[in-house]
Amino acid sequence: MQQYFTDELLSIGAEYVFTKEQAHHARDVVRLDHETIRLVDKENQGWFAVCESRGKEFVAKVTEKDESFNEPSIEITLCMALIRREKFELILQKATELGVTKIVPFESSRCVVHAKKEKSDKQKQRYESILLSAAEQCKRNIVPEITDVIDFKDIETAKSEVNLACYENAGRAARKISDFEIKKSVSVVIGPEGGFSKEEMEELGAKGFEPVTLGPRILRAETAAFYALSVIGEGAME
């Protein structure tokens, strides 16, 4: 079932007129016609509606409220170091599927990718488009937020109730993500391809981020993000 987000407040019997981009996708790409779809309104409520092409417009009439709320019980913030574009964009997609609430990109000393101010607006629009598409695909009730790129020194602005930093050299005595009781919110920090320096880990500790291990093997940055979010998401469903 196809899903679309709207910036309107919906109710049973209401008709929603698709935006130009949504109409193109529904009519010309996935070729919907008199099919039931899911709409999510500006208050994050889900609705079932039957869509049809009507002249130049593409519309959907709301038939029923969808009582399901496809969100984890906690707010999840992923603080993700900048990595190569294709891998970072994959993280955006999969993090959305895994229930992330907010993504905070940052630059640290070992990042091989650096933010370019002259391209920041265009790049953020692309990121938001990826998040929207992924949220529609997996039937989220919200689209995750992505912030502007921040410096490593400002990472404490992304803190939550529980704050964790995944570190490949944390050692066997380090705690695991599953050891923490997360009631409301969590922020998890993932470093770049080269990991964090010892000094950066000390700074993270001073800022209140506890180092955690993801196991005995060294994971790629994107794998570490998927693993951490999967463990957090499993706990959020309990």
Image (cartoon, rainbow, N blue to C red):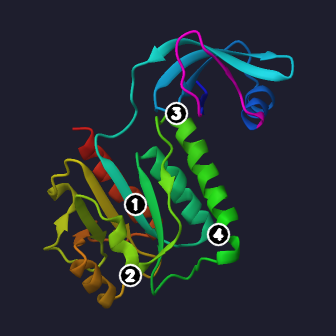
**Measured from the top left, where is residue 15 in percent x and y?**
65, 16
Quick one: label 1 or label 3, which is nearer the N terminus? Answer: 3
Q: CA distance from mark 2 to mark 4?
A: 20 Å
| Residue that mark 4 sits on | 120
**Circle on res. 153:** 2
Mark 2: few, some, or many residues within 10 Å (few <14, many ≥20)? some
**Measured from the top left, where is residue 95 in percent x and y?**
46, 52
Quick one: label 2 or label 1, which is nearer the N terminus? Answer: 1
* Secondary element at tag 2: helix
* Secondary element at tag 3: loop
Residue that extends furthest to the right in the rendered view of this protein: 55
Quick one: label 2 or label 3, which is nearer the N terminus? Answer: 3
Nearer the observer: mark 2 or 3; the answer is 3
- Is residue 195 among the parts visible in the rendering? no
Residue at the location (80% across, 22% down)? 57
Quick one: label 3 or label 4, which is nearer the N terminus? Answer: 3
* Secondary element at tag 1: strand
- Give the magenta range: 7-20
Residue at the location (44% across, 70% down)? 220
**Circle on res. 78:** 1
